[in-house]
Amino acid sequence: MAQVFPRYANVLTWVIIAGVVLGASTLGVAAMVFVRSPYSSQTQIAFTQPIQFSHAHHVNGLGIDCRYCHNSVEESGYANIPPTKTCMNCHSQIWVGSKMLEPVRESYRTGKSIEWNKIHRLSDFVYFDHSIHVTKGIGCASCHGRVDQMQAVYQHGTLLMEWCLDCHRAPERYLRPREQVFNMGFQPRDLKQADGTPHTQATLGAELRKKYDIRSLIECSTCHR
């Protein structure tokens, strides 16, 4: 009986199989890299806003506390965007003729809210509560980065599930005393242990995790409700 396939057919078959497997693996790795890239997760991207508001100037330069503007963050699941009246508490007296601030004055006159572009976008199926994180000693900078050094705010973390789980699996790596939650420049070494030696994050985190009764919540229902 004549040979149907040429002798190199077996080798070619294995080459094709290996190519398919390698190609699929490469595409899978490329997809994983892409979804974590700044382009996909929109980290490190400063969006254009209706007004050039500088957190670096207001927080770091003027020393304004986060809670002055985001005054619901300790009690609510949402860190509110401040109403125009909050801006006008100061800007009805300073920079009153600034062209850059005309949209603020117009908003105050008309009662129409300024349409800020949202920076941090969680998926609709994700439940997140700011107040519980603040209460448990998670600092603003842990999630939002050093906002006090940002001229234009950008997303610091990927907001992917693995990013959240990194903290939920070992919260002691991020804990700080509740009174230091809004201190952007806080360092564990600023506090002393019982024996007088400076704290490290490991010693401080372990102490606060016990003090605040913090559990490692990694069940799906914690965030997906």
Image (cartoon, grey):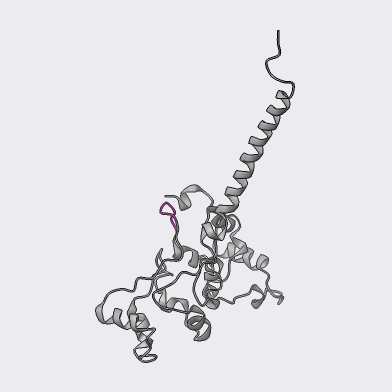
131 up-or-down from 101: above or below: above
Q: Is residue 159 visible?
A: no
Between 32 and 130, the one lying in front of the other is 32
Above/below status of 92 relative to 72: below
Q: Is residue 48 above or below residue 121?
A: below
Query: Residue lying farthest top?
Result: 1
The quarter of the picture where the N terminus appears is top right
Left or right placement of residue 29 versus residue 124 in this view: right
Residue 126 highlighted magenta (yes or no): yes
Q: Which residues are magenta?
A: 123-128
Q: Pinpoint residue 64: horizontal percent, then vertical percent.
A: 47, 82
Image location (x, y in percent) of residue 106 = 29, 81
Judge from the rendering whether residue 143 lies leftward or rightward of residue 130; answer left or right.
right
Q: Is residue 36 highlighted in magenta? A: no
Report the residue at 35% width, 71% height from top.
115
Name the main secondary structure of what is drawn in magenta.
Answer: loop
Q: Quadrant of residue 145?
A: bottom right
